[in-house]
């Protein structure tokens, strides 16, 4: 079987990886890079569980060929805490999700965290409606979304507080 | 209390937000192989032959299995062991697995599946309950009660028909509740592997590792002591991972044969075929009501579409009738039910298990009753609530009931009195209530052992380890366990290490279903923790020179006034005094008073209650329904962690609303030029509609605390009950908004439009089932209710006549 090889940046670290060329980014992350924090619920672009950030923008990793990601910068949930210089070891969004019940089973959580992070990068103080819109492609079967929306609002507040400190 | 009732980050919160929770598909082992299953493309057929030779010879394939490799059947209920890991000769739904390939990777396994040649002889399809009743042949299962009727049940608790006939008012209504599925975002997955010592371990996204353990022993025909099942945290369950699954059995077998780890993760489409979801149920309610608004009797008939296998169906069918008595006083009750087999994925337990369907009917009928009697629907209900510490007509023992406060709370917060029937065209409010079990009183297989066990370990480092078979499915069972232990021992819950859901090292707990975990595991945990606390107190008391029961356990200290030890110091003293420190606790529910055949379904240590008001806006031009707000109050007994409890309530409201408005697991016939096969209409997350963040209304949640003495710190369930009132409250709100009754779910804009057109034409403004087919219900089991001199047993025919 022919193998493909690319270099890319994953969670801020340069990575060179060889893989079966038909693989999606989701498979590359989970199977070849052992980053199993990225989840899947359909592998058809329907659930949002596999969302990661590519050059800072949320993308469904199940719909991207790994080959398309050569030279790009990928951020997964594993890199979130490090992307924020907080002493607590968690990104403020992660901490807010854990504190406010936004993660029940936690399966949709990585995708929603990264989607929320991208939203806050553009709009540090989004309205409730904007948050609901931003995560409307991420299905969560457990929470009814309300605690997720509240945790994103709280995360935004904590990010503002921590950056002003 | 220091821990119970305080909002907290859940103990597994960090794992969940860092991607470190290890779900089943995240388990990766050295030399692991991958498995795929070949599934029947026919809804009903006999297998004439299977040729696997090309697949077996394909490069990279390690093993191909078919039905002949599995002589033993399995099933979740002992009375319906009707499934095979791979169908040997008869397939009964599209998706029924017939063969499996194990290969070096998923891609190779998929390619090899294509090389398996199966010759089928198609059979006629049984597509609906009506067809199942009419056509005994082709018969899906030889063991069914008759033809394609899987099971018939009939009970009479007092002569309900006579009571109804003598009532001031009689209401007769038909309702239909469409089937729907759990849709956990995590697809089912498992990994099977042989340990170094040759024993089998299975990691699986299951809610019931103990039952999977038993089924594996039966199917693989090996001693249960050689098998270990580890339930990985479930990425959502909702009942969808409560059954024993084909792929778990097949992966176990493959790992045994190959001596290498074998993984399978189902595709989303396969999850739709796995199903075990909400049964479609047709219901007929005949209810008698007195002028002053009391129920005199109810006669309920249900017809349950079971799909292709038994699954939990016998229990589900009982549940379509068992809990009609626990909310409102019902002096006489007759219940008849039938479950039929059809050529569709098997139905089973989904959140609320068998009770949302009749609850939908009952609460809409109460709305109709209130209107006819000219009473406010909330007042009508308040006038007929079951009393605490009472017995029901079908011999269920009710403990605490906080429903009155739930109703008053949602009435007040929604401004019901000012707004109901007064909101103007297109806008309305609807109210409904619900009740649910806090754990099924009986285990699935008959035994007298505890239903939950907890084992604890303390050591001189001060660490606390708790072992329990309970399964974390997202609901927070680990957090409940840690909180209860922490409360008893006076430490922070984050200090408690929970090791759960592992049949190799944790005491048996029957699993995460029937809302049993908080009550059963919680009571077992208190039992164990109190034993250790007593040892610590005795040792610490000597050191501090006080009597043991004067000691306070709080904030990581054991103290009396100013004299104080750290928790770890107390452990050291106790370890010196007693040796290695451990304790076990167990829980068995109280024996239920019902003694008749069928009395096993319905009893519970306690019942939770909820009341809900839904606000609806209906566009009369399009039928479009918008739900701006929902108020819900839930009698939880006692809240353990309000953050999680609120999440359970809101998640239930979400799921109930989604069922009310859009979710349906439905089937269609392919056109004649194809096969005319009965296929799933839309086995995909995109087409199977569910509510997104954009559709979700604001939910106002209130937790009502009416502690129940059977429950740990009084805490009842919260994971399922709050779903129950939502669907009927939506239907009642739509009636308030536009004056049409939609007596079936889901309530979609086209049904609303149809009802509005009927209304405009001066016809009854109702969309719902029009007729209930003739079902050959048997003569009922006659059990006099407590107030008619019964003793909980079936009356002999002669006594029955005397009682009537
Ligand atoms: S797995 Fe990518 S959207 Fe569902
Ligand atoms: S927390 Fe379970 S799917 Fe969102």
Image (cartoon, rainbow, N blue to C red):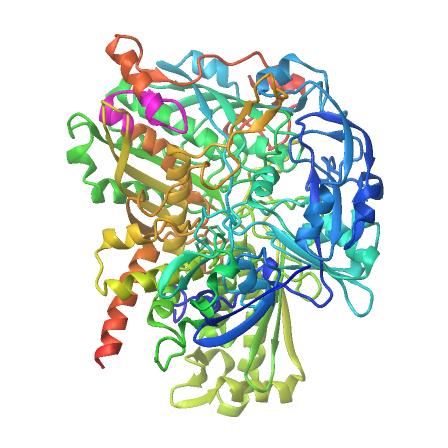
Spot occupied by residue B317 in the image (x, y as percentages of width and height)? 58, 30
- Label tally: 0
- Residue B560 visible here: yes
Q: What residue occupies the far front of the structure in this picture?
A: A2
Is B748 contained in the magenta span? yes
Please name whichever residue, B393 or B584, is drawn nearer the observer in this view of the structure. B584
- Residue B500, by quadrant, is bottom right
User: What residue range appears in magenta?
Assistant: B734-752
Q: Position of B207 compared to A100: left or right?
A: right
Q: Position of B671 compared to B726: left or right?
A: right
Q: Quadrant of ligand 2?
A: bottom left
- Residue B324 visible here: no
Q: Name the quarter where the C terminus of chain B is drawn.
A: top right
Spot occupied by residue A54 in the image (x, y as percentages of width and height)? 40, 63
**Residue occupying the point 34% across, 56% down:** A147
**Residue occupying the point 72% across, 35% down:** B80
User: Against B301, is B30 above or below?
Assistant: below
Spot occupied by residue B458 in the image (x, y as percentages of width and height)? 59, 79
**Residue occupying the point 58% across, 61% down:** B524
Q: Position of B570 compared to B135: left or right?
A: left
Please name whichever residue, B103 or A2, is drawn nearer the observer in this view of the structure. A2
User: Against B371, is B617 above or below?
Assistant: below
Q: Name the quarter where the N terminus of chain B is drawn.
A: bottom left
Spot occupied by residue B722 in the image (x, y as percentages of width and height)? 40, 44
Is B391 contained in the magenta span? no
Please name whichever residue, B362 or B45, is drawn nearer the observer in this view of the structure. B45
């Amino acid at each position: 079987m022919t193998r493909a090889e690319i270099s890319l940046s994953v969670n801020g670290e340069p990575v060179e990886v060889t893989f079966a060329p038909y693989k999606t980014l989701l498979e590359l992350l989970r199977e070849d890079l052992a980053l199993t924090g990225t989840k899947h619920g359909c592998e058809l672009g329907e659930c949002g569980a596999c969302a990661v950030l590519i050059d800072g923008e949320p993308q469904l990793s199940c719909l991207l060929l790994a080959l398309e990601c050569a030279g790009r910068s990928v951020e997964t949930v594993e890199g979130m805490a490090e992307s924020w210089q907080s002493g607590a070891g968690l990104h403020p969004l992660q901490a807010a999700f854990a504190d406010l019940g936004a993660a029940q089973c936690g399966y949709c959580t990585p995708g929603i965290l990264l989607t929320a992070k991208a939203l806050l990068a553009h709009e540090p103080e989004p309205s409730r409606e904007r948050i609901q819109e931003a995560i409307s492609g991420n299905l969560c079967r457990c929470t009814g979304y309300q605690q997720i929306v509240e945790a994103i609002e709280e995360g935004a507040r904590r990010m503002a507080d921590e950056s002003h400190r | 209390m220091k821990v119970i009732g305080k909002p907290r980050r859940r103990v597994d919160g960090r794992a969940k937000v860092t991607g470190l929770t290890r779900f089943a598909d995240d388990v990766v082992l050295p030399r692991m192989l991958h498995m795929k299953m070949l599934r029947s493309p026919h809804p009903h057929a006999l297998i004439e032959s299977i040729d696997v030779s090309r697949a077996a010879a394909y490069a990279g394939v390690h093993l191909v299995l078919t039905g002949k490799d599995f002589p033993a059947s399995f099933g979740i209920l002992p009375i319906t062991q009707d499934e095979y890991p791979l169908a040997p000769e008869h397939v009964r739904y599209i998706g029924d697995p017939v063969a499996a390939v194990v290969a070096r990777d998923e891609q190779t396994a998929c390619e090899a599946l294509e090389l398996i040649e199966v010759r089928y002889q198609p059979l006629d399809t049984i597509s609906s309950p009506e067809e199942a009743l009419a056509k005994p042949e082709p018969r899906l299962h030889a063991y069914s009660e008759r033809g394609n009727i899987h099971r018939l049940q009939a009970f009479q608790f007092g002569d309900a028909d006579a009571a109804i006939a003598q009532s001031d008012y009689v209401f007769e209504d038909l309702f239909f509740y469409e089937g729907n599925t759990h849709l956990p975002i995590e697809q089912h997955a498992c990994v099977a592997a042989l340990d170094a010592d040759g024993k089998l371990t299975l990691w699986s996204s299951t809610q019931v590792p103990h039952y999977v353990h038993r089924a594996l022993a039966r199917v693989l025909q090996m001693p249960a002591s050689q098998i270990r099942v580890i339930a990985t945290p479930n990425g959502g369950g909702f009942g969808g991972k409560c059954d024993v699954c084909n792929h778990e059995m097949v992966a176990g077998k493959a790992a045994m044969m190959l001596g290498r780890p074998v993984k399978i993760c189902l595709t989303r489409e396969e999850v739709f075929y796995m199903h075990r979801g909400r049964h479609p149920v047709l219901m007929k309610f005949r209810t008698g009501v007195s002028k002053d608004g009391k129920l005199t009797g109810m006669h309920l008939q249900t017809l349950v579409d079971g799909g292709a296998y038994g699954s939990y169906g016998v229990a589900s069918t009982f549940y379509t009738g068992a809990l009609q008595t626990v909310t409102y006083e019902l002096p006489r009750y007759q219940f008849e039910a039938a479950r039929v087999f059809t050529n569709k994925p098997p139905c089973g337990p989904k959140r609320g298990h068998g009770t949302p369907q009749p609850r939908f009917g009952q609460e809409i009928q109460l709305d109709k009753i209130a209107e006819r009697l000219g009473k406010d629907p909330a007042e009508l209900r308040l006038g007929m609530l079951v009393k605490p510490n009472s017995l029901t007509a079908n011999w269920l023992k009710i403990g605490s009931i906080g429903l009155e406060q739930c109703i008053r709370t949602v009435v007040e917060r929604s401004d019901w009195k000012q707004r109901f029937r007064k909101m103007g065209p297109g806008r309305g409010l609807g109210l409904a209530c619900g009740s649910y079990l806090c754990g099924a009183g009986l285990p699935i297989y008959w035994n007298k052992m505890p239903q939950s066990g907890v084992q604890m370990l303390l050591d001189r480092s001060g660490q606390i380890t708790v072992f329990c078979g309970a399964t974390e499915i997202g609901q927070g069972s680990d957090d409940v366990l840690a909180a209860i232990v922490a409360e008893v021992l006076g430490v922070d819950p984050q200090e408690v290490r929970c090791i759960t859901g592992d049949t190799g090292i944790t005491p048996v707990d029957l699993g995460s279903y029937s809302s049993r975990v908080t009550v059963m595991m919680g009571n077992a945990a208190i039992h164990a923790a109190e034993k250790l606390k007593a040892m610590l107190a005795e040792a610490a008391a000597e050191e501090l020179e006080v009597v043991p029961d004067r000691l306070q356990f709080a904030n990581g200290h054991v103290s009396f006034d100013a004299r104080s030890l750290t928790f770890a110091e107390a452990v050291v003293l106790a370890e010196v005094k007693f040796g290695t420190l451990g304790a076990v606790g167990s829980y068995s529910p109280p024996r239920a008073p019902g003694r008749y055949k069928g009395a096993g379904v319905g009893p519970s240590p306690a019942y939770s209650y909820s009341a809900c008001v839904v606000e609806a806006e209906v566009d009369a031009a399009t039928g479009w329904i918008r739900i701006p707000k929902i108020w819900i109050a839930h009698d939880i007994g006692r809240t353990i962690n309000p953050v999680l409890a609120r999440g359970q309530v809101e998640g239930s409201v979400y799921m109930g609303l989604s069922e009310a408005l859009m979710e349906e697991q439905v089937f269609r016939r392919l056109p004649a030029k194809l096969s005319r096969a009965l296929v799933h209409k839309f086995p995909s997350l995109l087409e199977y509609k569910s509510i997104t963040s954009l559709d979700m209304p604001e939910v106002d949640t209130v937790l009502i605390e009416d502690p129940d003495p059977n429950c740990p710190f009084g805490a009842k369930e919260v994971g399922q009950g709050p779903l129950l009132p939502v669907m009927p409250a939506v239907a009642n709100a739509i009636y308030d908004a536009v004056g049409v009754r939609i007596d079936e779910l889901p309530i979609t804009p086209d049904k609303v439009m149809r009802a509005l057109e009927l209304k405009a034409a001066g016809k009854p403004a109702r969309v719902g089932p029009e007729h209930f087919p003739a079902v050959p219900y048997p003569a009922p089991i006659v059990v006099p209710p407590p107030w008619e001199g019964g003793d909980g047993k079936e009356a002999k025919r002669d006594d029955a006549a005397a009682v009537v």
